Amino acid sequence: MSADFNVHERSPSWIAQKVLHATAYAFVSADGVLLEYGPLLARYFAFAQSMVGERVETAFAQTPSFLALVQQAVSERQDIVARLIYIERAGELAHVLVDAERVTDGEAGPGMLFICKWLDHLVTLESHIVRNDKLATAGKIAAGIAHEIRNPLTSVRGFTQMLHDQFERDKQERQRSFTKLMMDEIDHVNMLVNELLLLSKPTVMTVSRVNLQEVLEPFARVVQADALLRGVAFTSTIGDTPPVLIDSGMFRQVLSNLVRNALEAMEGIGSLTIVSRFDEVEDRVRIDVSDTGPGIPNYMIDRIFDAFYTTKEFGIGLGLPICQRIVAELGGEIRVLTKGYGTTFSVLLPPAKEQVPHGV
């Protein structure tokens, strides 16, 4: 391949017209100056000000993997086809597919055109399909088991309650304590059965247009009390966001599960934070639940949303799968970010449209 730029008779302005509405692009001069870029790239790279005329070392200082690719392409004057890189944006890793093409004799002189395609939506879609298949299979198994357990469990609970009441009347404290323990364990099993049934069938929701502040502010007061009892510091920042279409009760269940996991992970030491805001890059309402616990090991990240996968001594691994299912049925997703110290679960929901989504 030629070592100069005399390949394509195009100008960056012509290029801008071609790709502006299709993807994110940047045009870099032969000496490494960012001469032109599209608004979509500015959004994804979170430019706080205009970077036109800046050297690439300055413009892309916050995305070193992309900077290295730009420097290589400009230095070697080589086209690049479908190079996959990872960049950190807003505290999360994003998958980006980059093409680079040599341009000459344009209005701004020779240079390199970079076209970026964000693949996160494709990666997310694939992972959701695989996980939903697993949940569907687990749900079928769970439904059969749960129904077989529930009826005898109700009978056992009823007779145990009768014994407990009789021991209490006869003031047989030792026997009464045994039946109390038995009922507590039966109630725990019954809770697990209810979760199995929730996993096994579509979630029935009553969806309405809701301002999140109306849900999050009273919820934060409850969390404040719980955190205080556990010795954990708690702060909340509830921003002004567009309305969302949710089932308020189900959504509180999602938040409660995420908060409970965070509090249990910290074991009475650390801080819990809830932040809600509108993410302009994602064009979605975002609720972050962050803790300062030990974090989640890398080898567990891909499994935490799998049914029946848990690291808790008395858990069965249904909390997060059910949360993800609820959020997915609302048209959103749950993401997790952990770096060895502290974990953030992010719930992202689309702003409310005029019409309620079908099938909710």
Image (cartoon, rainbow, N blue to C red):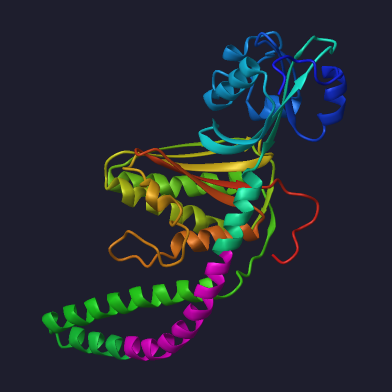
- Whether residue 141 appears in magenta in the rendering, the answer is yes
Q: Is residue 347 above or below residue 78?
A: below
Residue at image point 23% right, 78% down: 180
Q: Is residue 153 left or right of residue 28?
A: left
Q: Position of residue 286 (x, y in %)?
A: 59, 42
- Counting the numbered discs, the total is 0
Q: Which residues are magenta?
A: 132-158
- Whether residue 75 appears in magenta in the rendering, the answer is no
Q: Is residue 10 above or below residue 32?
A: below
Residue in the foreground of this view, choosing between 221 and 36: 36
**Is residue 314 among the parts visible in the rendering?**
yes
Q: Is residue 16 left or right of residue 190?
A: right
Q: Position of residue 294 (x, y in %)?
A: 31, 43
Q: Main secondary structure of the magenta part?
A: helix
Which quarter of the image is occupied by the N terminus?
Answer: top right
Residue in the foreground of this view, choosing between 123 and 245: 123
Q: Position of residue 137 (x, y in %)?
A: 53, 74
Q: Is residue 167 left or right of residue 187?
A: left
Residue at image point 44% right, 57% down: 303
Q: Position of residue 353 (x, y in %)?
A: 77, 49
**Is residue 247 among the parts visible in the rendering?**
no
Dividing the picture into quarters, in which one does residue 151 lie? bottom left
